[in-house]
Amino acid sequence: MCELFGVSSKRCVLINNYLNEFYSHSEEHPHGWGLAIMQENQSIIEKQPKKASESEELQNILSKPIIVEHAFAHIRLATMGYTDSFNCHPFSRIDNAGRTWTLVHNGTIFKYEALNQYITSQIGETDSERILLYIIDQINDLQDELERSLNPEECFQLLEEIITELAEGNKLNVMIFNGEFMYIHANYKNSLYYLEKDDTIFVSTRPLSTEEWNEFPINKLIGIKNSEVIYRGRTHNYEYIITEEHFNFILDHVSPDLKANLLNNFGDLNYAKEYQLNNQ
């Protein structure tokens, strides 16, 4: 429903070429764009509820060298929430230990009761924002219980538990950065790829160049620090396969224009069957 891009590097790298290719996909994802440049506890976020290819603000950003160690980018196809800046990714929050957490998400949470408590308190309307709010609350609760900040291993273990539970019955391709580690999870086959070169790892929904991109491992959380994989979670069994029920759920929540477009292109059950056949 959206596309994601992330970079983690041991040094500052120029990412304009990858971003230009990434944002060129906005014809298929016209409901907003976002870019986060992240360094330790600072996350500088630019986003706009506008097709990336038509955004003068984005074109101005891309006209200058973008040299980073850590970054996220996102283009949105709205399935949950209106086309509004509050619903554009990335999302960012600070935990009670002072760490800034930044998140981008591709997918839909069809059912997870613990997220419902944030519907009336979140700024926007997306399930993606609710995921981040829930993660922050879980981190804060454990830190309060321990009366100290979580160390990296504890952060990973808690996130692995949360992400694994969220993945059951839901589509959950997500990237999270907490100022030190980048956490990445996918449970949707052929929907996330990575490229390793020059002490840098690039991750994207689709390959962004003719270089050797590989499919990102699914059904486990990966913890990356400065391009190096530090943590590999246990493999779970919650690979996401779209169903007619899920497709109809999406149709009930999207805008009338997008609903008509989906039905005209795919129909109901035909779309689910086509996806399953293409990803067996």
Image: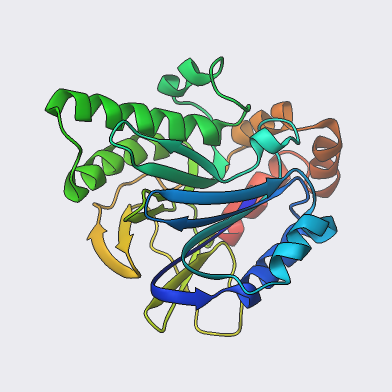
Q: Is residue 102 left or right of residue 207?
A: left
Which residue sits furthest left? Answer: 146
Report x, y in % for residue 235.
28, 52
Report x, y in % for residue 257.
86, 37
Residue at left 52%, top 63%? 190
Q: Is residue 269 left or right of residue 7?
A: right
Report x, y in % for residue 139.
29, 32
Answer above or below: position of 240 versus 69. Answer: above
In the rendered picture of this protein, how many numbered marks are placed on residues? Answer: 0
Who is closer to the viewer here, 205 or 103?
103
Q: Is residue 5 left or right of residue 113?
A: right
Residue at left 56%, top 43%? 107
Residue at left 41%, top 84%? 198
- Residue 168 seen in render: no
Report x, y in % for residue 125.
63, 27
Protein image colouring: rainbow
Q: Quadrant of residue 267?
A: top right
Answer above or below: position of 148 versus 192. Answer: above
Q: Quadrant of residue 99?
A: top left
Who is closer to the viewer here, 177 or 148?
148
- Residue 118 seen in render: yes
Residue at left 64%, top 45%? 272
Answer above or below: position of 230 versus 243. Answer: below
